[in-house]
Image: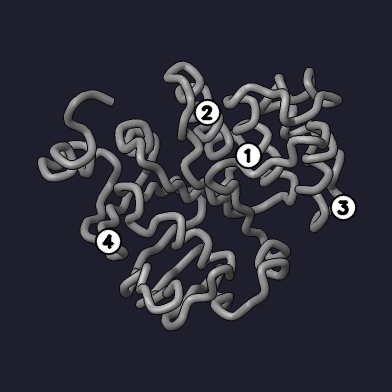
Amino acid sequence: MLSIAALHTYYGHIEALKGVDLEVNAGEIVAMIGANGAGKSTLLMSICGNPRARSGRILFEGRDITRMPTFEIVRLGIAQSPEGRRIFPRMTVLENLQIGATTAPGRFEEGLAQVFRLFPRMEERRQQRAGTLSGGEQQMLAIGRALMSRPRLLLLDEPSLGLAPMVVKQIFQVIRDINASEGMTVFLVEQNAYHSLRLAHRGYVMVNGRITMSGSGQELLANREVRAAYLEGGH
């Protein structure tokens, strides 16, 4: 579904991605783990066209999207829930979800039903201002807003960041449900290596803008280097 080859992305003169190659197949959950500043978020942003990759290719369902504007990429069926959630705090839950549906206006009710099925709390809070929600609820809203565009590929950037352990488990269960019952392909970027690799069919490790390792989620969980770098000292 997604194929990335020899991708280089820069911020000014600083090279953030250094020849990244990876694939995400339809129906998979693929996790990308790595330390803060490794380039994981830059990769998701580059897929969405901002920042634009300087060289290399990004193919979505065989179509080259490397130079495509972001709104067209979303229309093709890619949506991102960004790091830090970036919800609109003064708007209600429902208004935030309506913004997510701007590229799929004819399927608004369908999208809303899906979000409320996955996140019953959002239905209860639909008229509440988003800024008054708890951190976990705001993360649910951010994922729900991405789902409103009815994507075939969902990009999730650090969905567990700053959340209590119980809420983290809840969020990862929903990601599993999105994949299993909704059939959606998920590309997940996470510092929480334990939860993301347990969930993922396959995973990649990124260090300083380069992919250094790949394998099944179970293989990476069992890998001595991965354990030493990302899993020692508890989950």
> Dot 1: what SS?
helix
Viewer-side label of 3, 4: 4
Look at the numbered discs 4 and 1 and tell me whether their residues touch, using CB distance below 8 Å: no
* Residue identified by numbered label 4: 208
* Residue identified by numbered label 1: 143
* Badge 2 amino acid: Ile
> Dot 2: what SS?
helix
What's the CA distance linking mark 2 and mark 3?
26 Å
What residue is rendered at 51% in x and 73% in y?
59
Percent position (x, y) of residue 53?
Answer: 48, 76
Query: Which residue ends up furthest to the left in the rendered image?
Result: 224
When the figure is inspected, residue 17 is found, relative to residue 145, above or below; the finding is: below
When the figure is inspected, residue 228 is found, relative to residue 213, above or below; the finding is: above
What's the CA distance linking mark 4 and mark 2?
27 Å
> Dot 3: what SS?
helix
Q: Is residue 188 left or right of residue 66?
A: left
What's the CA distance linking mark 3 and mark 1?
18 Å
Look at the numbered discs 4 and 2 and tell me whether their residues touch, using CB distance below 8 Å: no
Q: Is residue 89 left or right of residue 8?
A: right
When the figure is inspected, residue 170 is found, relative to residue 158, above or below; the finding is: above
Look at the numbered discs 2 and 1 and tell me whether their residues touch, using CB distance below 8 Å: yes
* Residue identified by numbered label 2: 171
Whichever of labels 2 and 1 marks the residue nearer the N terminus, that label is 1
Quadrant location of the C terminus?
top left
Percent position (x, y) of residue 172?
Answer: 48, 30
* Residue identified by numbered label 3: 105
Whichever of labels 3 and 4 marks the residue nearer the N terminus, that label is 3
* Badge 4 amino acid: Asn
When the figure is inspected, residue 48 is found, relative to residue 107, above or below; the finding is: below
Viewer-side label of 4, 1: 4
Q: Closest to the observer: 18 or 102?
A: 18
What residue is rendered at 74% in x and 31% in y?
130
